[in-house]
Image (cartoon, rainbow, N blue to C red):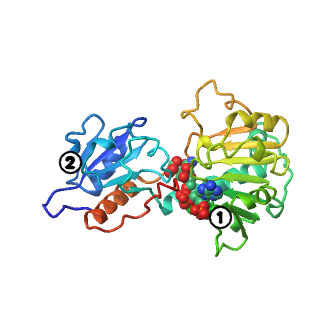
Amino acid sequence: MASTDDKGRAPCVAILSAVLDMEYLAVAFREAHPGIDLRLGEELGALDQIEAVVCWFPPHGLLARMPKLRLVQSLAAGIEHIPADAELPRQVPLCRIVDTGMAAGMKAYVCWAVVQQHRGMRAYVASSAARRWEEQPIVSPRHHRVGIAGLGTLGMACAEALAAIGYPVRGWSRSAKEALPAGVEGFHGAAQLDEFLSGCDTLVCLLPLTAETHGFLDAALFAKLPRGAHLINVGRGDHLVEADLQPALDAGQLSAATLDAFSQEPLPPDHPFWGDPRILVTPHIATRTDSLVIARQTLDNLASLRQGRRPANQVDLARGY
Ligand code: NAP
Ligand code: GLV
């Protein structure tokens, strides 16, 4: 962890977000490194002292004014909110969080989302409230195929967890995967997308948001799924063409959608997804990373860079993830 540099200076880290109050993260940084020179909110001080920034939707143009910046750290797994700043200093390493706790949270959410729809759990909430002893049809998980678009850190963890509770799982990624967990079939690239989609009774989107994946979940894609498929989007809101979702539900091409990410967050109060019984909205909570993990990974990455070593989980900006 970054303690002091060769001149005895404590790490100088700024926490930046144009959309969230970041005080909760400041507490974790102070716990991880009590002597830290931490800059937050309006209190950024001299920008030429800042060595690392931790970001969630950082204000545009600010990072370009930090001449000593060594590290840009996303506080999340996704990073698209950072290069959205056209003035991002692209020569500075950009890293993301990879964490077993984050993966555990995502596994729990995705398994819950698959099971709640496949087993008709929402009907039990209603029958329980009405004191009715009423079974829903039980279809064995063996007969419900789950596809995961994005077989990376989180997608692979979810694939393994779903296979372990009996679902036949398939995953789709950009590159071919060699050693897949038992019960998980791999597909890759544009050439295998249609074949992948044709076997997804539930489709889970766990792609990063890039120029290639923006608008991935649209009417043309829904038409390639088995009729009545369930869509789960735990990627980003802009993966989904929102205007295409309710027509696909109306037509019966999709039966339900569980959505955790939206083009506009918070989802506006008059948005048509609210109150649609076929759409379950959750407020971007599929998983969260412990703030101490974010602080430690940031300080470790800064220490590596101060010592001329590569930081962990650096993003390939050309690839976009
Ligand atoms: P990751 O490890 O980078 O995995 C990304 C996966 O997507 C990889 O398998 C990659 O293929 C695949 N991929 C990327 N572009 C593709 C394309 N054009 N075609 C096909 N496959 C493509 O990312 P991660 O850590 O699993 O996180 C995934 C995303 O989840 C994040 O970017 C974030 O948006 C979202 N997320 C949401 C929440 C939430 O609470 N809702 C929480 C955390 C993360 P290769 O394996 O071939 O590279
Ligand atoms: C959350 O959305 C993340 O990308 O970690």
Q: Earlier in the sequence, mark 2 or mark 1?
A: 2
Image coordinates of residue 272 in percent, x first then y, are 69, 28
Image coordinates of residue 205 in percent, x first then y, are 65, 51
289 or 51: which is nearer to us?
Answer: 51
In the image, residue 214 sits, relative to residue 311, either above or below, namely above
Q: Which residue is mark 2?
A: 49
Give the image quarter of residue 299: bottom left
Q: Residues within 10 Å of mark 2 (few under 14, many from 20)?
A: some
Q: Residues within 10 Å of mark 1 (few under 14, many from 20)?
A: some
Q: Which residue is mark 1?
A: 161
In the image, residue 131 sits, relative to residue 76, either above or below, namely above
Give the image quarter of residue 132: top right
221 or 86: which is nearer to us?
Answer: 86
What type is the residue that disc 1 sits on?
Ala
In the image, residue 59 sits, relative to residue 7, either above or below, namely above
204 or 198: which is nearer to us?
Answer: 198
Residue pictured at 26% horizontal, 43% vertical: 39
Q: Which residue is farthest left?
A: 7
Label 2: which secondary element: helix
Label 1: which secondary element: helix
Q: Which residue is farthest top?
A: 270
Residue pictured at 84% horizontal, 51% vertical: 226
What type is the residue that disc 2 sits on?
Gln
Relative side of 163 to 223, left or right: left
